Image (tube, grey):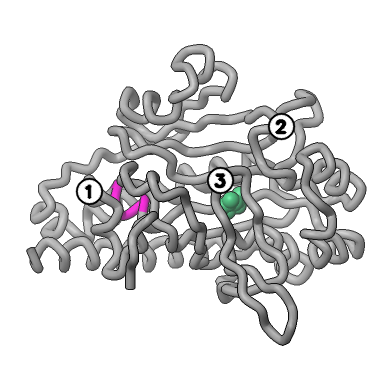
């Protein structure tokens, strides 16, 4: 058992190191995570953000650093952060093998980038990573009996509408089981995502965003896209999503002062570890797993 654990954590440690090295070579700067803030991503799914009072003010535990990433680009051009997120998921998510209510995502953002730029970056980053892990962690992969397939860019793409038409509402997991290599789902309908992903100029009603799906049934790897950055557009998108401006006061103040255009994504480290190590349950990727619905340390 302990041989198995050591193998998993050695691989995870190597994954983080290799990802950071790759991004630094591409001129990214690593910033520190934000754990507490009056502004956080309120997400499009049924999670509840953790809240605490600090000096009489309401602070959230970070659900994603999206607004801080956009704000950071006022000073820096390319950033990444290993960002701990707390998302209090519905208790039945403990069965998926993919959900933890505390996890870490490698979140990155590039000023003036387009979706195409970050998709290309991601394909190269993942391909390089797998190549390196196969080289660096031969012994550990053997202990885990994991045969990891090397992927080759460009990854296949399918639009949300095509996926829905072909596979029905559970398309994500069906696609994940059917494909042998990572695959993109692009162009989500506007109401299916948060207000900060940018609406397509030439495809109104759809977003310039994407999800990456792991093969072999491992499910969603990451989400990202181009961002809304103009104050008036952000307010309009919030209104259409039925979000209260009062919940995003700090963000709107920053947006009013001017945000740069950008694109980025966030990839879950525990899910990436699970995929690379070929694990059934995500709990194995952390020593202190926060399993939805359970009391955890
Ligand atoms: N990190 C994601 C992004 O950059 C957002 C999220 O995790 N909800 O789009």
Q: Which mark is residue 159?
A: none
> Which circle, 2 or 3, is nearer the viewer?
3
Name the foreground residue: 13 vs 246.
Answer: 246
Locate residue 165, reporting x and y percent: 53, 13
> Separation of disc 3 and disc 1 at Cα?
26 Å
Instruction: Please provide percent x and percent y for residue 22.
Output: 45, 61
Residues marked 2 and 3 touching at CB (< 8 Å): no
In the rendered image, is residue 278 in sight?
no
**Compared with residue 12, is residue 196 higher up or lower down, i.e. above or below?**
above
Residue beneath the point at 81% across and 41% down: 237
Q: Label 1 neighbourhood size at 10 Å, few (<14), some (14-19), many (20+)?
A: some
Give yes or no for residue 35 being in the magenta stretch.
Answer: no
Bin the neighbour count of mark 2 within 10 Å (Cα to Cα): few under 14, some 14-19, many 20 and up: many
List the residue tagged with mark 1.
279
Is 142 situated left or right of 217 in this image?
left
List the residue tagged with mark 3: 46
Front: mark 3 or 1: 3
What is the span of residues highlighted in magenta in the rendered image?
271-275
Asked whether residue 261 appears in the rendered view, the answer is: yes
Q: Which label sits on residue 190?
A: 2
On-image quarter of the C terminus: bottom left
Please state if 93 lies on the left or on the right of 207 as rendered: left
Label 3 vs 1, first from the N-terminus: 3
In-front residue for pair 132/55: 55
In the rendered view, does 249 fall on the left or right side of 136?
Answer: right
Question: Hey, which quadrant is residue 54 in on the image?
Answer: bottom right
Label 1 secondary element: loop
Q: Residue furthest bottom?
A: 55
Helix, strand or loop for disc 2 = helix
Local secondary structure at mark 3: loop
| Residue depicted at 34% across the width and 65% down the height | 295
């Amino acid at each position: 058992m302990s041989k198995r654990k050591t193998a998993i954590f050695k691989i995870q440690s190597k994954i983080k190191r290799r990802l950071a090295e790759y991004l630094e070579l591409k001129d990214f700067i690593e910033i520190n995570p934000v754990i507490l803030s009056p502004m956080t991503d309120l997400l499009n799914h049924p999670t509840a953000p953790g809240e605490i009072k600090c000096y009489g003010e309401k602070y959230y535990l970070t659900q994603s650093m999206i607004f801080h990433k956009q704000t950071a680009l006022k000073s820096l051009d390319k950033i990444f952060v290993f960002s701990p997120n707390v998302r209090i998921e519905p208790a039945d998510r403990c069965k998926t093998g993919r959900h933890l209510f505390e996890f870490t995502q490698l979140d990155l953002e590039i000023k003036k980038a387009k979706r195409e730029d970050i998709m290309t970056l991601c394909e190269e980053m993942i391909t390089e990573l797998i190549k390196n892990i196969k080289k660096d962690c031969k012994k550990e992969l053997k202990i885990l009996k994991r045969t990891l397939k090397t992927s080759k860019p460009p990854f296949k793409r399918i639009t949300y509408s095509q996926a829905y038409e072909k596979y029905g509402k559970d398309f994500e997991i069906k696609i994940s089981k059917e494909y042998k290599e990572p695959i993109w789902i692009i162009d989500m309908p506007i109401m299916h995502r948060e207000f900060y992903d940018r609406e397509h100029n030439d495809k109104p009603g759809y977003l310039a965003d994407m999800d990456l799906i792991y093969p072999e049934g491992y499910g969603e790897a990451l989400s990202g896209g181009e961002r809304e950055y103009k104050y008036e557009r952000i307010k309009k998108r919030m209104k259409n999503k039925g979000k209260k401006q009062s919940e995003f006061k700090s963000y709107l103040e920053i947006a009013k002062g001017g945000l740069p255009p950008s694109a980025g994504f966030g990839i879950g480290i525990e899910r990436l570890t699970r995929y690379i190590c070929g694990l059934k349950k995500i709990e194995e990727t952390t020593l202190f797993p926060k399993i939805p619905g359970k009391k955890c340390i």
